[in-house]
Image (cartoon, helix red, strand yellow):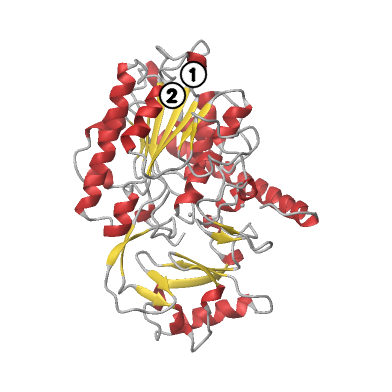
């Protein structure tokens, strides 16, 4: 679903290895969740103390608004791939601005998980899990045990761990619909990708047709209207890769996304459900500008250590290396960093190589055997290649450290469970799963988000509403 220009975007083995791996993942998930819960408690205070909220004299500041037509809560998540935070300020976007003005928005953007690639982030949004725990650690990767290769067309359940929202919703006897979303075509648990409610990915389907199909669900009898829906657009990711984040064609693409939101809003208003639906408009990642002159070539490290291309699982912006058995990964990392820091490798200072267990803990990118043992963090806007070339083409890329502001995307929520005119601090997208389950009043699966964090963003309900 992401651009083919990405170098991109889980754990299932047989026998005792599977049991050991599952136990390790469970323990790691429990520890990570405990840390997240502690952080969320403090972060909740930040939300309530720093968020701009409706007047305390308004009942809306205390609870959600009642439904006027729908008989049950509905959440629609819309992904605009590669919608970098800040694009919404490039020009007037009347429909998106309407959602912001009358809803809740992350004031400085939504923080993607690392790596900031399409498939890992889309699946984190719907599972609440960091990539090592949901298994999609890149857009493309190789299972080191059986040698099988994951790509963006892989629908075998073995790759996809965790419990995505459509499965959670189905487990509770509710209906879900997916109009394109990584993992939605996987038959897993109670979810079998039902016809008419789960669309097989087809990039050529016009965006307007996708919107109209979602609108058609609201023409169904009440008990047939999905409680949870997804909708996906490939833009402005395509334009960002080809032209970079500052090109006028990005602005044109964003204007088209705004027009689609207008089409959706009008269709909902005609059906009398716009104020009843909880709409979450977001992206999966941002975009950074790149140029071929900002290249780090692995062949330039030959004086210190040779890195054959057969060892490299991904080059950029996430460098992943898996040497064959018998090589010391720590020695390789030490020699690579020695060369990069020598001053004799072009742009070497913009690449830092780690054993995966030594990566900064904030990245949450080590607890999976699928992640290669050597990981390189690339400087913002720089590219890793095997061999240096003389080209000077410029474009855009993502996948970089999620601490880079350019990797942030948007979070805009509008509906009865979101306060009007509220701005909240930035947060990671693993928190969204619990927001959705809270709105739908269902119990979710274990995840890396926190219930207390969801309570800080989602309005509570009156006991006599919905």
Q: First in sequence: mark 1 or mark 2?
A: 2
Q: Which mark is residue 461?
A: 1
**Residues at marks 1 and 2 touching, judged by CB atoms closer than 8 Å:** yes
Q: Within 10 Å of the Cα at label 2, are there few (<14), some (14-19), or many (20+) other Cα atoms?
A: many
Question: Relative to 115, does residue 200 appear above or below in the rendering?
Answer: above
Instruction: Give the distance between the C-alpha atoms of the residues marked 1 and 2, in whole angstroms.
Output: 8 Å
**Residue, far right:** 16
- Of residues 280 and 154, the one drawn nearer to the viewer in this rendering: 154
Q: Where residue 143 sits: x, y (%)?
A: 63, 60
Q: Please tell me which residue is depicted at 54% across the width and 40% down the height of the picture.
A: 185
Mark 1 element type: loop
Please give the residue where the numbered disc 2 appears in the rendered image. Answer: 417
Q: Please tell me which residue is depicted at 74% across the width and 50% down the height of the picture.
A: 23
**Residue, far top:** 464
Q: Please tell me which residue is depicted at 62% across the width and 25% down the height of the picture.
A: 172
Q: Where residue 96 sits: x, y (%)?
A: 28, 34
Left or right: 300, with 433 as reference point: left
Q: Where residue 289 sits: x, y (%)?
A: 30, 61
């Amino acid at each position: 679903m992401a651009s083919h220009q990405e170098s991109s975007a889980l754990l299932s083995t047989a026998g005792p290895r599977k049991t050991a791996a599952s136990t390790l993942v469970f323990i790691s998930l429990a520890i990570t969740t405990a840390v997240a819960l502690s952080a969320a408690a403090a972060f909740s205070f930040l939300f309530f103390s720093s968020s701009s909220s409706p007047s305390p004299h308004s009942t809306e500041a205390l609870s959600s608004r009642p439904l006027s037509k729908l008989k049950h809560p509905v959440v629609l998540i819309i992904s605009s791939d590669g919608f970098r935070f800040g694009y919404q300020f490039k020009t007037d976007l009347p429909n998106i601005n309407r959602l912001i003005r009358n809803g809740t928005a992350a004031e400085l953007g939504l923080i993607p998980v690392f790596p900031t690639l399409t498939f890992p982030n889309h699946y984190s949004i719907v599972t609440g899990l960091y990539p090592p725990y949901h298994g999609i650690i890149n857009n493309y990767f190789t299972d080191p045990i059986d040698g099988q290769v994951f790509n963006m067309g892989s629908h075998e359940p073995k790759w996809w761990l965790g419990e995505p929202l459509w499965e959670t919703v189905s487990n509770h006897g509710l209906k879900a619909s997916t109009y394109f979303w990584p993992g939605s075509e996987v038959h897993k648990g109670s979810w079998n990708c039902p016809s008419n409610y789960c669309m097989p990915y087809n990039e050529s389907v016009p965006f307007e047709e996708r919107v109209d199909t979602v609108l058609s669900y609201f023409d169904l009898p009440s008990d047939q209207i999905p409680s949870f829906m997804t909708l996906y657009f490939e833009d402005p990711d395509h334009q960002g890769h080809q032209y970079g984040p500052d090109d006028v064609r990005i602005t044109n693409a964003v204007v088209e996304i705004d027009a689609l939101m207008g089409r959706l809003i009008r269709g909902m208003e005609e059906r009398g459900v716009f104020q009843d639906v909880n709409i979450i408009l977001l992206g999966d990642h941002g975009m950074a500008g790149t140029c071929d002159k900002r290249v780090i070539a692995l062949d330039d490290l030959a004086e210190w250590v040779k890195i054959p291309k057969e060892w490299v699982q991904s080059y950029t912006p996430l460098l992943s290396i898996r040497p064959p058995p018998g090589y010391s990964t720590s020695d390789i990392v030490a020699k690579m960093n020695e060369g990069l820091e020598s001053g004799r490798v072009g742009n070497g200072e913009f690449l830092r190589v780690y054993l995966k267990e030594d990566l900064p803990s904030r990245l949450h990118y080590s607890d999976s055997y699928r992640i290669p043992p050597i990981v390189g963090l690339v400087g913002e806007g720089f590219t890793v290649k095997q061999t240096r070339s003389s080209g000077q083409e410029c474009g855009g890329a993502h996948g970089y450290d999620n601490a880079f502001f350019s990797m942030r995307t948007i979070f805009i929520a509008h509906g009865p469970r979101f306060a009007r005119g509220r701005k909240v601090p930035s947060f990671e997208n693993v928190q969204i799963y619990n927001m959705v389950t809270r709105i739908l009043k269902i119990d979710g699966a274990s995840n890396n988000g926190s219930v207390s964090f969801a309570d800080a963003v989602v309005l509570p309900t009156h006991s006599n509403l919905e």
